[in-house]
Image (cartoon, rainbow, N blue to C red):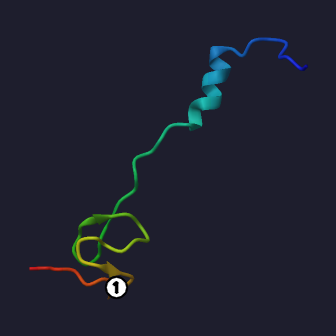
């Protein structure tokens, strides 16, 4: 059975894990209503996507 010759140091372990952090979800303003929405998704507020209304919503 293969066993590591030396123990992995804390510095080496933490350098490896430097890319494991979670980033907050990106939000872009809707061009129609300026509400924050994920990019490449239909706006939940107004139903607008790519220069047209895709989903009908109840706007008062």
Residue 24 higher or lower than 1, as above or below:
below
- What residue is rendered at 39% in x and 82% in y? 50
Residue placed most toward the observer, 13 or 58: 58
Residue that extends furthest to the left in the rendered view of this protein: 60
In the image, taking residue 4 as reference, residue 24 lies left or right, namely left
- What residue is rendered at 65% in x and 30% in y? 16
Q: Position of residue 27 (x, y in %)?
A: 35, 59
Q: Position of residue 22 (x, y in %)?
A: 47, 41
Helix, strand or loop at mark 1 = loop
Q: For residue 26, what is the image quadrant?
A: bottom left
- What residue is rendered at 28% in x and 70% in y? 44
Residue placed most toward the observer, 42 or 18: 42
In the image, taking residue 52 as reference, residue 13 lies left or right, namely right
Q: For residue 37, what is the image quadrant?
A: bottom left
Q: Position of residue 18 (x, y in %)?
A: 57, 32
Q: Where does the N terminus fall, quadrant-wise?
A: top right
Q: Position of residue 30 (x, y in %)?
A: 29, 71
**Residue at image mark 1:** 54
């Amino acid at each position: 059975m293969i066993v590591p010759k030396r123990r992995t140091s804390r510095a080496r372990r933490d350098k490896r894990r430097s890319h494991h952090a979670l980033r907050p979800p990106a939000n872009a303003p809707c061009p129609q209503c300026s509400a924050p929405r994920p990019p490449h998704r239909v706006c939940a507020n107004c139903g607008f996507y790519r220069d047209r209304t895709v989903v009908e919503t109840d706007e008062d």
